[in-house]
Image (cartoon, rainbow, N blue to C red):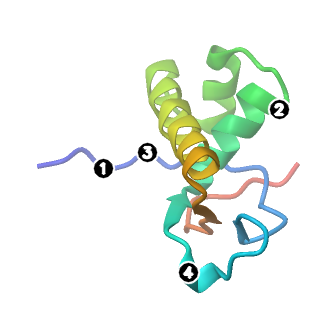
Amino acid sequence: MARPKIVRKIACRPAYSCFKPNGVPMKQLPKLALASDELEALRLVDMLGLQQLEAAQQLGVSRQTLGNIIARGRHKVAQALVMGMALELASDSIQTIED
């Protein structure tokens, strides 16, 4: 039996629901879903430049879990850019915190 998922603390919501290549209708593109926790991890580490330990504390997970989340998120972003896929930004029901 799988371990229950720890509640993540998400402090940002995406400005848009998806990103896609220009000039190609959305219905013609393969899609990848970027989860809320993956976007938040990328924001904390890659955009804000936080160390993984500090980012993990803000997200409410272990440093190892944060590393796994970042790896998944980076892989999805790279795959979407290289292969011309649409990146759908999920609005999961993960706990959102207000600043």
Tell me whether circle 4 and circle 2 mark residues in contact (CB < 8 Å): no
Q: CA distance from mark 1 to mark 2?
A: 29 Å
The residue that appears at 66% across and 47% down in the rendered structure is: 39
Of labels 3 and 2, earlier in sequence is: 3
Of labels 1 and 2, earlier in sequence is: 1
Q: CA distance from mark 1 to mark 3?
A: 6 Å
Tell me whether circle 1 and circle 3 mark residues in contact (CB < 8 Å): yes
Type of the residue with mark 4: Gln
What x and y, as percent, mark residue 8?
56, 47
* Residue 91, quarter of the rendered image: bottom right
Type of the residue with mark 3: Ile
**Which element type, helix, strand or loop, lies under badge 2?**
helix
Q: Which residue is mark 3?
A: 6
In the figure, 30 relative to 10: above or below?
A: below
Q: Residue 47 bears which disc, if any?
A: 2
Q: CA distance from mark 3 to mark 2?
A: 23 Å
Of labels 4 and 3, earlier in sequence is: 3
Type of the residue with mark 2: Met
**Which element type, helix, strand or loop, lies under badge 1?**
loop
The residue that appears at 72% across and 72% down in the rendered structure is: 17
Q: Nearer the viewer, residue 68 or 19?
A: 19
In front: label 1 or label 2:
2
The residue that appears at 67% across and 82% down in the rendered structure is: 25
Q: CA distance from mark 4 to mark 1?
A: 36 Å
Q: Is residue 9 visible?
A: no
Q: Which residue is mark 1?
A: 4
* Residue 78, quarter of the rendered image: top right
Q: Which residue is mark 4?
A: 28
**Which element type, helix, strand or loop, lies under badge 3?**
loop
